[in-house]
Amino acid sequence: MESFGNLLMGFQIALTPYNLFVATAGIFLGTIIGVLPGLGGANGVAILLPITFVMPPTSAIILLSCIYWGALFGGAITSILFNIPGEPWSVATTFDGHPLAKQGRGGEALTAAFTSSFFGAAFAIILVTFFAPIIAEFSLKFGPPEFLGIQMLTFSAFVGLGGGSVPKTLVSIFVGFIMATVGMDIISGQLRLNFGTIELMRGFNFVVAVIGLFGIGEIFLTVEEGLSLKGVQAKVTWRTVTSTLKELTRYWKTFIRSAVIGSWMGIKPGGATPASFMSYGFAKRLSKTPEKFGHGAIEGVVAPETAAHAAGVSALLPMITLGIPGSPTAAVMLGGLLIWGLQPGPMLFKEKPDFVWGLIASMYTGNVIGVLIVLLFVPFFAAILRIPFAILFPSIVYVCAIGAYAVNNSTMDIWYMMIFGVIGYVFKKLDYPIAPMVLALVLGDLAESALRQSLIMSQGSPKIFFASPISAALVIASILLVIWPSISRFLAGRAHHHEAPQKAS
């Protein structure tokens, strides 16, 4: 019942005219970002983060989270009408969404996608509402060793469960840690890795880094690849909406299964992309008509969109309760919280209940606003893709440069942004993940501080990390996650070895 009371307080904050305006603007901006191929939610949040510095923290996080929701909605439009996934997690939506549009059923596909997105997000928001206070209450028992264990678990989860190359993820984390050490030592006050330059005394600003890594790096890639957009026209009418909603009730099992898969993948750092593919695979395997998949099955749109939105929302649960971001976008938002002077974790619920519950309530309002906006303005968002990219990309670079300059009113930050843009471009070309690097840049100081505080408490003995059950469990779980890919490959190899002789006989 306490959660209901707090949620009502949150709605009083989220439903103020200013925050409703902020949420609507965020959804609108996010949908445009999601429609633009390659830009993506994390990039959009990174680029627009500086404009939140003049806003109250609650309104700022509402704006950023609504940009994120909007980007999730916008990705479906390009996938279905143009066969171009605006977001990585929208790739699975193209499999059946675009064939439906080519058959003249674009309105049905869009309605199914938006309805699925709404359901997936709503499922995850309810999860966040009731589980966030429980996790936050539990983490009140944490001290420096436990917080170091949590941060180890975060990095290990990206290594063991991220699904990418383990060596590349480790390299990305290592580079992020090096960047985090540049500047003044937070405990001794000594200067590190500034190479005698005054500009590097304060280290790299997180906002400048993420604008460069995500925004400029993606622009470089998009310019290099070029874009040729040929889409299908579609119009969503109320008759299409009502008839599609009646048909969607047949897929209630797919809705629930996909929402559960998406929520789980969001809480652990798996992200929306693997969630959408996994959900699509389950839907096809368990369908009575799997042969229709890939040729225009509505269920093939429902499954990935439900899972992607559930994953996108649930990724915020570990971020606000433990400071563990479950997605690249959540990692950028985590940096924003630290810039506003807010420390994610249990004390956030005690010290800033208006912030936490205002954010959670805004998820409900943002989800409703998002569905209404995308249903009403589909033709407008689709028309954005007809603007020549030669006009769009200089505008985006200009916005990025203003954002980087605004951090410290320094032209040097624009140069840093471009350097980070080149790093981001190289990492993406070589298929190195950027999110672990950003995470190490954000959490590097906190992890170092927790490590040194723990060792000071124990007078240098590492046994302190195994002194409490919570800390020991977190450290052991971190080690298991790091070696899990090797264990799984070993088990798969043994299974294959046993199966081969049986097939031969």
Image (tube, rainbow, N blue to C red):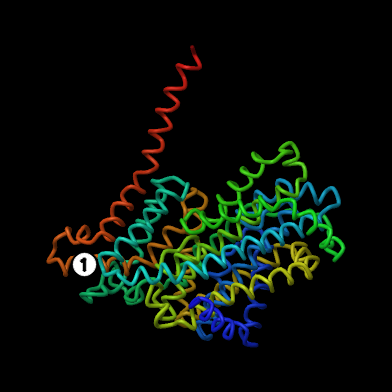
Residue drawn at (72%, 58%) of the image: 113
What number of labels is visible? 1
For image coordinates 65% across by 48% down, the residue present is 92
Residue 413 to residue 172: above or below: below
Image spot of residue 500 (x, y percent): 47, 20
Q: Is residue 245 left or right of residue 347?
A: right
Q: Give coordinates of residue 438: x percent, y percent.
A: 43, 63
In the picture provided, is 505 more to the left or to the right than 194?
A: right
In this figure, which residue is indicated by the disc labeled 1?
454
Residue 205 figure quarter = bottom left
**Hey, which residue is sitting farthest bottom in the picture?**
17
Q: In this view, which residue lies farthest toward the top?
A: 505
Q: Is residue 475 visible?
A: yes
The kind of secondary structure element at disc 1 is helix
Asked which quadrant contains residue 365, the reply is bottom right
Instruction: Name the side, left or right, on which 22 lies relative to 447.
Output: right
Identified at 47% across, 79% down, the residue is: 407
Residue at 77% x, 45% y: name it: 296
Looking at the image, residue 69 sits to the left or right of residue 444; the answer is right
Q: Amino acid at mark 1?
A: Ser
The answer to whether one can see residue 223 in this image is no
- Residue 299 lies, with reference to residue 26, above or below; the image says above
Q: Residues within 10 Å of mark 1 (few under 14, many from 20)?
A: many
Taking depth in this image into account, of 105 and 6 the one nearest to the observer is 6
Give percent across and percent down for residue 436: 42, 58
- Residue most extreme to the front: 1
The image shows residue 362 at horizontal and vertical percentages of: 59, 76
